[in-house]
Image (cartoon, coloured by chain):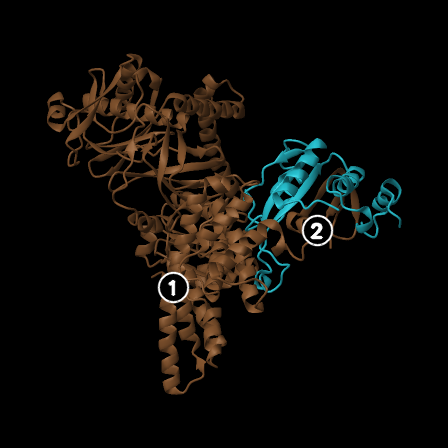
């Protein structure tokens, strides 16, 4: 029987988990994009971090984790009509700027879901991009998910 | 359900299907918090997770509805639950409802939520009360929500009230429209009418549609869209003629006249103060956010606004996570000082405590130029006389400009004298003292004041030793020695009896000399001489050029003579008039004229016709002396008579004429014909 974690609790657990993996937990950025005319409002966790990904700015640390407030209004007509659409949501993210790669990313996502949150491995189904044999190997060999 | 998405950035695509492995591989991975909560809390949808359910419940409480009893109500309940979250967070980040950009997104979210509140039967405003729940549920992760809660409530309520008024007004107008449609037996509302509701009264078009549909009516949508297009075209045209300043004047006029600003910048370049008013380029606002252009007003400012010829300060206004670049500072009626600029980072709202910092280097440079202007005015009076009065002044960080009454251009000696006086007063290290006194007292000190300028009861007097005393509100150096150096770079007349001096001080003087030195060095290197030898070298070169030019001239005329051979042999007499008609190839029109003049001199009296093939074309001239003319010779008619032979045309005066032609093969014919024409002319 898993515990029922609240939204605020889940947010904190995620950030703390990645802090324990030597990530810098940064505060959510403003919904107003900074120096970015391509975007009206921040719509994804990585959007305010673009300068770090493109190498335009040096990140304060090569491992960063955030819980970013986001707004997407593309589907505004459907909000309310369905129980799935939201204009406001929060995106949990962990980011590596030329630091760790697939092994750690996959292992930590698995660890957070199964150990920290206690989700049963049998109920989780990882899927990989069709051509990414490396990711498949990691899931299959290192995590032990049957093909 | 997908909860986690791992994105591996490993390859760079060139857009043609080729991928290159990246040197720095990045990881961008994450998951939606709400979705994760759906899984962890084992509920059906995001609207059932703990934080969202609290808002949903509050909507139900405010409306007296129960979730999941009526499908139509459920749509409104979910819509409000979602939209109030977006609106609360957007306002907390400084976005204000407006008609464009993200401000429009916010306005739309607030108005949709308000309308669905009405549909659920909620009366009056409710969004602020609902956002209270949003803040309570989210302040754990976003503590700023609680800090800004009063501001959030105020913005939401204002917009909601504005919308409610719009709806009430719109409903009345729409009812009138419906009535007249019924009277005329029409079923379709004209597009122009629907657009008027939407554009003039801000009534949402979908609401118009909905209400009409209930009565079995509809809207002429094509007409609506074309009315909208027409309006857009008009607006675009209007925007073109509206400039930045034009818009400013209007927005500043709408500020409460009771708002004033205290200037505290004579001896301070930084200050902490409270924001009293904010404006965008077009309207008053409660907040300014990242990237927006606008004006900030505070209670006390160290920023000097453009006044008395001194240019405005620039600098920054900031808080912990907000930065605003002040690009201009303006003084407005009623003692308000506006800081115009752009938000570089974060947000600011009315009531915030901000730190103001003037660009100190720039202020110092302006102070030096302004103090030097005072010294200049006094020096001009000493050097030129007491008729010198200030007629205008413009002082910025790069230079000073001073206009004054004087009736002729200043001589180099006068300019040197003025520079010498000013530099002597800089070297004398005079203390600069400022004092406030009544205008009456100031006049007794003999302070220079601007003729026709209005001064208040108390005035500020700026004194530089015993040399200069002026009424002035500007900022200055503490001692004239800080000006370091003074250099006039221009003196000119700008109106009858008004002269203008442009001058530099301090580092700008050194930079000016650096530029001159660099130019001189460049000139010297081109001349392959030492800088000090440049004038001598140029004198030599000019002498060389002159002698080369005269040598060139004599060579040219010698060449023309050679081309002609010993022409004097070819002189014949026609009816007693000496005539020389000959060809001299390779000579241009100028050379031909010079040659003609020479020959005329040798000939004494007579007629000369010369033809030359030059560059594939033909030049012809004819000349007649006074004596020849008396006998009937006419150079102009002569040329007219023969030009056709060389495929051209021309003419001229009786004594001298010229023509051009395109056919060199006709030259000999033309020369032969010249004798016949002349024979006809002569008596």
Q: Report the residue that reaches farthest toward the bottom.
A: B185
State the residue position of label 2.
B39
Between residue B456 and residue A100, name the one nearer to us: A100
Between residue B279 and residue B640, name the one nearer to us: B279
**Same chain, labels 1 and 2:** yes
Q: Percent position (x, y) of residue B285?
A: 39, 48
Direction from residue B210 to residue A135 in the image, left or right: right
In front: label 1 or label 2: 2
Which quadrant of the view contains residue B481?
Answer: top left
Which quadrant of the view contains residue B287?
Answer: top left
Q: Is residue B411 above or below residue B175?
A: above
The quadrant of the image that shows the N terminus of chain B is: bottom right
Q: Percent position (x, y) of residue B30?
A: 69, 45
Q: Which chain is cyan?
A: A
**Sooner in the amino-acid sequence: mark 1 or mark 2:** 2
State the residue position of label 1.
B166
Q: Which mark is residue B115?
A: none
Q: CA distance from mark 1 to mark 2?
A: 42 Å
Q: Report the residue that reaches farthest toward the front.
A: A1
Q: Percent position (x, y) of residue B267?
A: 31, 23
Q: Percent position (x, y) of residue A52?
A: 65, 38
Query: Tag 2, which secondary structure?
Result: helix
């Amino acid at each position: 029987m898993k515990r029922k974690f609240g939204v605020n609790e889940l947010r904190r657990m995620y950030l703390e988990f990645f802090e324990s993996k030597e990530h810098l937990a940064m505060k959510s950025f403003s919904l107003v994009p900074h120096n970015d005319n391509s975007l009206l409002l921040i719509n994804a966790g990585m959007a305010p971090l673009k300068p770090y990904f493109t190498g335009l700015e040096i990140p304060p640390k090569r491992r960063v984790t955030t819980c970013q407030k986001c707004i997407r209004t593309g589907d505004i007509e459907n909000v309310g009509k369905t129980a799935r659409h939201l204009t406001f949501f929060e995106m949990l993210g962990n980011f590596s700027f030329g630091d760790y790669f697939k092994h750690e990313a996959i292992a930590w996502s698995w660890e957070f879901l199964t150990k920290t949150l206690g989700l049963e491995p049998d109920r989780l189904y990882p899927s990989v991009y069709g051509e990414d044999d490396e990711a498949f190997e990691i899931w299959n060999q290192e995590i032990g998910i049957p093909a | 359900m997908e909860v986690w998405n791992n994105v591996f950035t490993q390859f760079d695509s060139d857009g043609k299907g080729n991928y290159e492995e990246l040197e720095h591989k990045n990881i961008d991975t994450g998951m939606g918090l709400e979705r994760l909560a759906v899984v962890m809390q084992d509920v059906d949808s995001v609207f059932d997770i703990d934080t969202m359910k609290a808002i949903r419940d509050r909507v139900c409480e405010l409306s007296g509805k129960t979730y999941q009893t009526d499908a139509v109500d459920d749509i409104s309940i979910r819509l409000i639950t979602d939209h109030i979250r977006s609106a609360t967070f957007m306002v907390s980040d400084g976005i204000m409802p407006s008609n464009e950009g993200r401000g429009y997104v916010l306005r739309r979210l607030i108005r949709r939520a308000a309308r669905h509140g009405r549909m659920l039967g909620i009366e009056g405003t409710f969004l602020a009360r609902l956002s209270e729940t949003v803040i309570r549920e989210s302040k754990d992760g976003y503590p700023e929500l609680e800090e800004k809660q009063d501001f959030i409530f105020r913005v939401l309520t204002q917009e909601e009230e504005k919308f409610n008024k719009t709806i009430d007004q719109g409903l009345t107008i729409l009812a009138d429209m419906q009535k007249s449609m019924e009277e005329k037996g029409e079923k379709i509302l004209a597009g122009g009418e629907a657009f008027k509701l939407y554009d003039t009264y801000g009534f949402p078009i979908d609401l118009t549609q909905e209400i009409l549909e209930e009565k079995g009516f509809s809207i002429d949508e094509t007409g609506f869209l074309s009315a909208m297009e027409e309006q857009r075209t008009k607006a675009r045209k209007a925007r073109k003629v509206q400039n930045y300043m034009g818009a400013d004047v209007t927005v500043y006029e709408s500020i409460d006249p009771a708002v004033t600003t205290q200037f505290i910048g004579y001896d301070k370049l930084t200050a902490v103060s409270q924001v009293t008013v904010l404006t965008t380029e077009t309207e008053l606002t409660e907040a300014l956010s990242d990237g927006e252009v606008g004006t900030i007003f505070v209670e006390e400012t160290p920023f000097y606004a453009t006044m008395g010829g001194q240019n405005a300060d620039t600098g920054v206004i900031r808080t912990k996570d907000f930065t605003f670049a002040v690009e201009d500072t303006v003084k407005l009626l009623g003692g308000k000082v506006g800081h115009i600029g752009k938000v570089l980072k974060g947000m600011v709202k009315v009531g915030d405590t901000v730190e103001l910092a003037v660009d100190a280097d720039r202020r110092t440079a302006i102070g030096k130029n302004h103090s030097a202007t005072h010294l200049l005015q006094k020096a001009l009076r000493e050097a030129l006389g007491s008729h010198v009065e200030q007629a205008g002044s413009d002082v910025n960080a790069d230079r000073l400009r001073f206009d004054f009454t004087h009736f002729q251009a200043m001589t180099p000696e006068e300019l040197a004298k003025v520079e010498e006086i000013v530099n002597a007063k800089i070297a004398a290290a005079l203390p600069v003292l400022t004092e406030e006194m009544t205008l009456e007292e100031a006049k007794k000190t003999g302070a220079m004041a601007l003729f026709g300028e209005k001064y208040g009861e108390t005035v500020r007097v700026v004194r530089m030793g015993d040399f200069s005393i002026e009424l002035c509100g500007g900022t200055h150096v503490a001692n004239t020695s800080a000006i370091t150096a003074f250099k006039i770079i221009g003196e000119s007349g700008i109106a009858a009896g008004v002269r203008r001096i442009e001058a530099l001080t301090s580092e700008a003087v050194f930079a000016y000399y650096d530029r001159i030195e660099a130019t001189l060095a460049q000139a010297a290197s081109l001349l392959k001489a030492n800088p000090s030898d440049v004038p001598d070298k140029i004198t030599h070169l000019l002498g060389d050029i002159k002698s080369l030019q005269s040598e060139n001239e004599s060579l040219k005329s010698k060449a023309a003579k050679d081309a002609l051979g010993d022409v004097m042999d070819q002189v014949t007499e026609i009816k007693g008039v000496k005539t020389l008609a000959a060809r001299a190839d390779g000579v241009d029109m100028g050379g031909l004229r010079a040659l003609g003049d020479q020959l005329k001199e040798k000939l004494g009296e007579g007629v000369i016709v010369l033809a030359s093939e030059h560059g594939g074309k033909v030049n012809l001239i004819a000349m007649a002396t006074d004596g020849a003319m008396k006998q009937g010779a006419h150079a102009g008619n002569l040329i007219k008579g023969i030009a056709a032979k060389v495929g051209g045309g021309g003419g001229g005066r009786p004594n001298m004429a010229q023509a051009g032609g395109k056919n060199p093969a006709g030259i000999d014919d033309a020369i032969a014909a010249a004798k016949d024409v002349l024979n006809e002319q002569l008596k």
